Amino acid sequence: MKTFFRQSGVAIRVLVVFTVLLGVVYPLGVWAVSRLPGLHDRAEGSLIERDGVVVGSALIGINPVFDGLPRQDPWFHTRPSASAEDPLGQGDPATSGGSNASAFNPEQTELVQQRKALIAEREGVAPAMVPADAVTASGSGVDPGISSAYAELQAARVARNNGVSEAVVRALITEHTSTQAIGVPSVNVLELNLAVHAAASR
């Protein structure tokens, strides 16, 4: 019986110590580090504000889906989301993940072809001109960026529906193109759309 109580006492002390360390000290330490200069914005989700209002995150891509007339579709689109009910529908940002379907899956192949046809029709181009990232969902389903090729494909529509010149939109694409995120020329969709909105407002 003495052994039982001794072991129970040790177990309770270990439980208390680790509860304090991992349940209090560690979270407070992480929080304190996140307050350091240069880390605060990233720790809060890399939120982007305009006029004091949070308009989104630089790390999470939300596809702006519009129904109706073409002029109601004035923004650059992100990559498709595997969680969307329709081929180019709005995905659920709370559900992050890919489809895990291979390129040889008949349903996946059909979905890619549907996306290609819909994007080609939306942008007024031949299906062969639609880049791969425009029709394939990413691993996360909420990628914030698209290839510069997909951005260039959307430039004419975005310019027309915002009442700005195509040259201005293409210049904004070039200005916001970077290779830092995925190693290839890519554009953050939210930041590019904000730049277009600012240009259209001038």
Image (cartoon, helix red, strand yellow):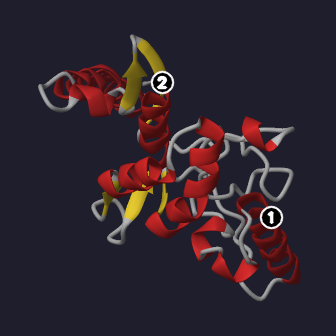
From the top left corner, tell me how far across and down residue 150 is, in percent: 55, 65
- The circle on residue 145 is none
- Relative to 202, say whether 52 is above or below: above
Q: Secondary structure at mark 2?
A: helix
What's the mark number on residue 201?
A: 2
155 lies above or below 68: below
Residue type (three-letter) at the residue carrying disc 1: Glu
Residue in the image at 71% along x and 71% along y: 125
Pick whichever, 100 or 56, lies toward us. 56
Q: Quadrant of the C terminus?
A: top left
Where residue 131 sits in the image (x, y, percent)? 60, 75
Q: Position of residue 185 (x, y in %)?
A: 36, 68
Horizontal side, residue 39 vs residue 176: left or right? left
Q: Is residue 103 left or right of residue 188?
A: right
Measuring from the top left, give residue 196's x and y in whole percent. Answer: 47, 38
Figure label count? 2
Task: Identify the residue at horizontal 80%, vertical 64% (top origin).
Answer: 121
User: Mark 2 or 1 closer to N-term?
Assistant: 1
Name the outermost residue toward the bottom.
104
Residue at x 73% of width, y 77% of height? 126
Residue drawn 66% across the image and 69% down it: 136
Q: Quadrant of residue 39?
A: top left
In front here: 99 or 91? 91
- The answer to whether any part of residue 27 appears in the image is yes
Look at discs 2 and 1 and give the one toward the viewer.
2
Q: Quick one: SS at disc 1?
A: helix
In front: 25, or 159?
159
Asked where in the image residue 139 lies, by quadrant, the reply is bottom right
In this view, the residue farthest toward the left is: 37
Which residue position holds label 1? 121
The amino acid type found where label 2 is placed reads: Ser
Could you tell me if the residues under marks 2 and 1 are in contact, i.e. CB atoms within 8 Å?
no
